[in-house]
Amino acid sequence: MDFPAAVDYILSFADYERMPRSAVVFDLRRMERLLARLGNPQNAAKSVHIAGTKGKGSTAAMLASVLKQSGYRTGLYTSPHLLSIRERIQINGRQISEDEFARLTVRIKPEVEAVNASGNLGELTTYEILTALAFLCFQDSGVAYQVLETGLGGRLDATNVVQPEVCVTTSISYDHMDVLGSTLAEIAMEKAGIIKPGSIVVTAPQAPETMKVLEDVCRQQKVKLVKVGSDVVWRQKSIRPEKQSFRLKGLMGEYDIEVPLLGEHQLENAATAVAAAEALAGRGAVITARAIINGIASVSWPGRLQVLRKKPWVIVDGAHNGDSVRRLVAALRQYFTFEKAFVIFGASSDKNIAAMAAELKTLPHRVIVTSSHHPRAVAVELLAEKFSREDIIPEISENVASAVEKALSLAGSGDLVCATGSLFLVAEVMEYMQRRD
């Protein structure tokens, strides 16, 4: 089996990233059965488990970078990917190779088929199989730490099969409400499902009702809770379109840090990653101040306030709910100087498009709505209708390439073009710009 065949095999199963989530039955017993057949590779390394609505991928990447700088062989598992499925499984910043991906798929295939034929738990999903493949990869590579980002929620997520050293909750807001619940407290309870006895919990700043849920769960599980924003604090020092700097006072020291990811929310994510690193140090990991500083400074996490071009600015950001779009708009005004803004927007069908459109009202000179190739992408006519209700009359482009060309033809050298609303849209814009340039 070669790499394309391996990808085709894994994608042949139910994929809740590409189908309505209501059609997927979440049941951790499938995952546990598969991992048992594989020898429980999830237990081979020490784990950091990260849940949240926004910032969990950035936080995971920063923490993995710190652990690498500390001399630990470190696995990183994230989702979704931008350009290649291999991005989801990384060791010390390097993606799993095509050959290794294919080899592990061959190894896992008979166990997948045995589990699927064994009972009434339903078939394993694409995400569950990928998660098991990541655990196998990390075990075979002898990683010391594995940093795991949940895909959806936490309680029933396929990654929730580890006994973590540290549990992290990044910013929690309204998203995936069809699955996770209609209130912040309900959503927080699902995210808090990763918290287990014997761990340390680190949380980013949260809304009061969210924080209460986390405090209650930590109290029930008898675990320590570290609050970023009160136990760990920071202040911004300088900003540039390439990077920003801040000073952070943590539990174990003070640090002057530069981070190449833009937006004040990335300072929050960086502070959360530092707090998690300090929590690991409190459990015996050897992590120095220099490793923390160098790890944050060298992180790579594409598709988040990423500059693809200057004159005009061309920026992509995977903001996909109202709160993250609000932060994006604030960051664009804070970090960039421009005359007019042109927004290329596309979203998935399970997102609150009205909330995102409302946040964009103060920014754009013009909005161009479009649709990515992703099967859950919203049709442009529906996007246009949603924006019209917010008193924004958008232009329509049937595909990403035409949307980019339209924006670039309208934008002058002192203007800004920003593509947002979905990581799937961002990926297509990045691919098109690479070919174009």
Image: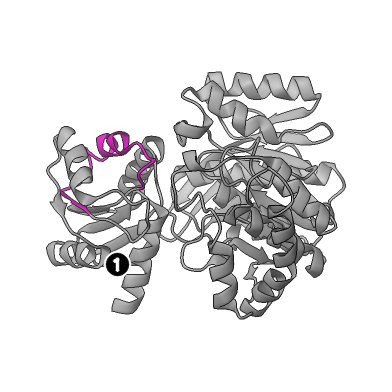
Q: Nearer the viewer, residue 287 or 21?
A: 21
Q: Which segment did they paint magenta?
A: 348-369
For badge 1, the amino acid type reads Lys
* Percent x, y of residue 296: 61, 56
Q: Nearer the viewer, residue 424 or 32?
A: 32
Judged from the image, the secondary structure of the residue bearing numbered disc 1 is loop
Please tell me whether residue 84 is drawn above or below residue 219 in the rendered image.
below
Q: Tell whether 169 sits left or right of 344.
A: right
- Write the residue at 36% across / 41% down: 325
* Percent x, y of residue 403: 21, 62
Residue of label 1: 310
Q: Quadrant of the C terminus?
A: bottom left
Q: Is residue 288 visible?
A: no
How many labels sit on residues?
1
* Percent x, y of residue 211: 60, 23
Residue count near mark 1 (Cα–Cα under 10 Å), binned few <14, some 14–19, many ≥20 = few
